[in-house]
Structures are given as C-alpha cells and as structure tokens.
Image: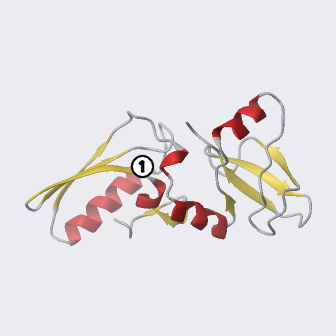
Amino acid sequence: MYSVKDPEIPVLSIMDMGVVREVEINDRKVLVRITPTYSGCPAMDMIGAEIKMALEEAGYDTTVELILSPAWTTDWLTENGRQQLEAYGIAAPLEESADKLALMGRSRQVKCPHCGSDHTKMVSQFGSTACKALFRCQDCLEPFDYFKCLK
C-alpha cells in the first residue's frame, strides 16, 4: 500500500501519512481500515478506491472501511513522511504546544522548507487545504504551506 499516495500530497504514501490503521488478511480477503486526517476529508473516497484497486490487481478481494475513532493525529506521520513533506515544500507539523500558542495570538516558529529560515510569517490560518496554513518566508520571500499539528 506504499504505492497508494495521498491525492492532495502526492509524494506521501497513505502508510507514511498514518491513514492506514489496520489491515486484516484472511486467505485472499483483505479488510483495510483507514482514518481521515480530517473528518469529511474529500480525499478519503479516492484513497479508498485506490487501495481497493491496488489490492484487487494483486488478486485480493478487498474491503475498505472508514473509521473515525480514534481521530487521526499528526503523531501518526512517519519520520519519512515528515521528510517527504519538507522536500515537497510543505513545512511538517510542529509539536502540539507550538500550534496552541497560535490560538493565543502568539506566533509559531515554522521553518521555511525552501531555504531553512526561521524568519517566517503566517499569511493565513487556512492554506491550500483545511489541514494546512499559509506562510511566507521573510528571507527568500517564498510562500509555503504548513501542515497543522492535530492532536
């Protein structure tokens, strides 16, 4: 299932995203349980269809089940996933306390994935998708998404 990518972040496999929560194999029957990064995430139907297609091409009778509990958290991102985000130009989630500071009007120190500068500024709490915020580097002047920390 490492070949199945997140449609919104095509460099990340659903395994590196931590979306796949459980796989049960019984002979040629497979049950895959997945959890969305956000409830109502529009990518989940596509992810489920791609899982089913990949496993059925390999000869498995596949069922994909969406589970909402426990809720997905950015802790489920693998280290490889975090590195892939950065290489793709999306800042990986910071620790939980960094995003909580933003709720109190204090700024996060988000490193620019383009030049590595900590001299960045949030432009909007909402980026290209609901799970991202839009930032701009004050040094290289490039805009970039920051994948919000979710706990």
Give whichever of 14, 101 is nearer the camera. 101
> Could you tell me which secondary element the residue under label 1 belongs to?
helix
Residue located at (69% from left, 65% from top): 89
Amino acid beneath label 1: Met
Residue tagged by mark 1? 44
Give whichever of 47, 79 is nearer the camera. 79
The quadrant of the rendering that contains the N terminus is bottom left
Percent position of residue 36, x then y? 44, 44
Does residue 4 appear left or right of residue 112 in this picture?
Answer: left
Q: How many numbered badges does the structure rendering display? A: 1
Percent position of residue 94, x then y? 67, 48
In the depicted structure, whether residue 120 falls above or below residue 141: above
Give whichever of 118, 141 is nearer the camera. 118
Residue located at (84% from left, 62% from top): 117
Q: Residues within 10 Å of mark 1 (few under 14, many from 20)?
A: many
Residue located at (83% from left, 30% from top): 105
Percent position of residue 100, x then y? 71, 33
